Amino acid sequence: MQLVLALALAAPLASPRVDESIVLRPAEGLVLRRHFEHTRKSEQEHTHDEGSSSATQSHTATLVVLDRTLAVADGRATKVSRTYEEILSSDEYRHEGEWGSNDGEMAGTSELEDETVTFTWDEDEEAYAASGEDLDEELLDDLGYDLDFTALLPSGAVDEGDEWELEPETFTAAIGFLESIPLEYPEPEGAEEFEEVHGEGVEFIEPEIEEETDGEITLTFRGTREADGVKLAVIEIEGEIETERVIEHTQEFDEGTHSSTNEAADTVTYEGELLWDLEHGHLFSLELEIELEMSAHSSNTFEFQGQSFDSESDMSGSGEGKLSVRFERVEDED
């Protein structure tokens, strides 16, 4: 008896256990600000019947939302209030060729900015339904809820060094934070002049698109580290996705038609790190470096006032970008 007591006294006191499962654990009352930013710069070289030209383009996409988890059941957030604090997709471009140069910019905005949408889990549909006071139904019909990145997590317990694979479509859907948000762009410069020259009866026929995607994304559990006083799971991300697509497009206007076939190939390489908050059960941050190689061949036929003209062009280019995501736990600001 004395030996048992001595062993018990000599044993270290057990510390409170932290659930280290890499899973989503929503909590009622949680207020989370989610910051997303995707930047990309690319350069392209074009060769065509009239000579050659070059182009540069920069792209920035930004989303900031404030989520309040209002109800949780069976490990799922069943009611979430989301305020869209910032939504922006902007592009700047410059073209240079033998004919001179031109540049411009275009920005897409959304009527959802500064609005609040409530997402409610529909058990029968197994999906979230979006609703909002005085919001147009067209804004809500296809609006997605999932910004949690759970598709990137392992399906079960993992040890340091364990790997798992993701299909390209699953990965790109998980990181495409603006995909379901309706954006509005200003009318392109010259659109009114185009109508004056070619007539108001311009008809844009929906293009036919064939696309094939190959590749895979590998994720590796690299253990844990601490930051901002919390324990984080470290997941390394690397992989390559190749996409080939053929786009056939026709425009019809008063004096004739313009038909085009575009064959394009892209290779996108990803490398980065996801940090998961083990204590609170949500994403802490995601950083991805992105490299892009692209090529395209385009064939065009113009039929205008009884005459036919053909042209061809080729494009090659490269680019680099970055995706940065961070989640911030905040006090309720109401």
Image (cartoon, helix red, strand yellow):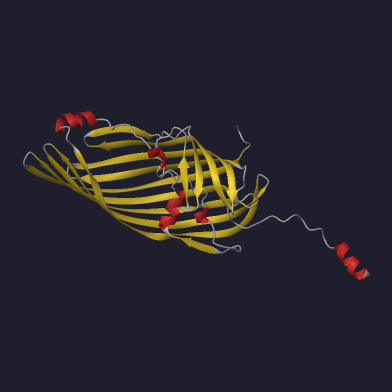
Name the residue at 50% across, 43% down: 119
Point 19% across, 39% down: residue: 203
Q: Nearer the viewer, residue 44 or 266?
A: 266
Q: Position of residue 182 (x, y in %)?
A: 39, 39
Determine whether 217 is above or below 51 in the image: below
Identify the residue shown where x is 42% and y is 50%. 291
Asked where in the image residue 205 lies, by quadrant, the reply is top left
Count of numbered circles on the image: 0
Q: Residue furthest right?
A: 2
Name the one closer to the observer, 102 or 245: 245
Q: Position of residue 246 (x, y in %)?
A: 26, 53
Judge left or right: residue 70 versus residue 321.
right
Q: The N terminus lies in which quarter of the figure?
A: bottom right
Who's the residue at 15% across and 32% down the image? 199
Taking the image as shown, residue 57 lies to the left or right of residue 207, namely right
150 versus 163 height, above or below: above
Counting from the top left corner in percent of width and height, residue 307 is at 7, 42
Quarter of the picture containing the C terminus is: top right
Residue lying farthest left? Answer: 306
Which image quadrant for residue 112?
top left
Q: Position of residue 13 (x, y in %)?
A: 81, 58
